[in-house]
Every structure is written in structure tokens, then in C-alpha cells.
Image (tube, helix red, strand yellow):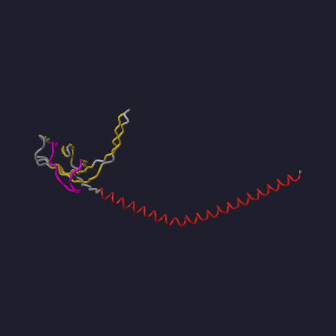
Amino acid sequence: MYAIIRTGGKQYKVQAGDVVQVDQLEQKLGSEFEINEVLLVGGESTHVGMPLVKGAKVTVVVTKQARTKKQIVFKKKRRQGYRKFATHKQDFTELFVKAITSPDGKVAKAEGQAEVVDVAAKRADAHTARVAARKERVSNKSAGEEVVKKAAKKVAKKKVVKKAAKKTAKKATKSGAKKKAAKKTSKK
């Protein structure tokens, strides 16, 4: 059995056990309620409403209250120097269709259970995990800095020794070159 329901000015075809995203509804997370705006009930016998089917209802459970992914809104008029860029996220409510009741009393029930997801709690848990990881990295970094500082001191000592050796080598070559030049001039 299936039904066509109307909510938020839009129509949706649903069956028992379906999960549907509709425009945001003012319902609490995990709450169960009935949608009475049923336009059509189909299956073995079809009931068409004018505009609504009397006695038909769809029982749903709110499984999620969240926002959609970010959509890019870009407007441009060519050769006019007009460009607009914006983004948009739409609020939505996710519904699990638990049962459909037709006007003659037949009921189609869902086999599965509704899985309620608290997006705000999930986001808060992820945030605390990120903060804890950041603190751990900082503590590891400070412990690792001591080792790095010791290694840096060793490298700095080696560099100083190399520079001193280069300076003495330069002095030796300069003084040797001066003596040779002096000898050459004296021979003439």
C-alpha cells in the first residue's frame, strides 16, 4: 500500500518503511505523529480524495532535524559587470513512515524500526573529540620539543665547529698565498 501526502506545500509518495525528507516541521526529535493530509491511498483498492481522503492517515516518526548540504547560488549577467555569489542551506525534517491507514480500515505497517539521529549531539561529540586530539598533540609536542632541542644543540655545535675549521683553512691559504707572492717578487 502507498499514499500521497501533502506537507509544506509539497506532495510526497510514501510507503510503509520509507524515509522521507520534508520541509522543516515543528516536531521534537523521536516524536510520533499522524499526517491527515492524504491525497490518495493506493494498493489493492484506490481511494482518491477531493482534495483529501476522509479517514486516511499516515503515521510517521521524526528521525532527524538538520540542514541540507551547502548549495551555491551564483548569478551573472554577461557583459554587464554583474556577478553575485551566495550559498544556502535548507532546514529539513526526516520522517520514517511507520504505518498507512486507509479509509476502509486496512493498515500497512513498516517492518523495520525508526533510527533516530541527533545531529546536534553528534556534532558536539565530534567537537569534543577534535579538542581532545588537539590537546594531546600539544602535550606530545611539548614532550617531543625537549628531544628536538637536544638534537638542535648537537647540530648547532657541529655547525660551529665546521665554521671554525673553514675560517682557519681560509686564513692558512691566504697567508700561504701572500708568502708565495712575496717570494716571487723578491726573485726578480
Residue 153, percent from left and from top: 60, 65
In the rendered view, would you say 112 is above or below 160?
Answer: above
- Residue 159 found in image quarter: bottom right
Residue 4, percent from left and from top: 18, 43
Q: Nearer the viewer, residue 59 or 145?
A: 145
* Left or right of 47, for residue 119: right
Quadrant in which the N terminus is drawn: top left
Magenta stretch in the rendered image: 23-44
Q: Is residue 87 magenta?
A: no
- Residue 135 found in image quarter: bottom left
Residue 79, percent from left and from top: 38, 32
In the rendered view, would you say 116 is above or below 14?
Answer: below
In the rendered view, would you say 125 is above or below 58?
Answer: below
Q: Residue furthest top?
A: 79
In the rendered view, would you say 70 is above or below 135?
Answer: above
Q: Nearer the viewer, residue 16 or 7?
A: 7
Q: Residue at x 44, y 64 (%)?
A: 136
Residue 120, percent from left and from top: 30, 57
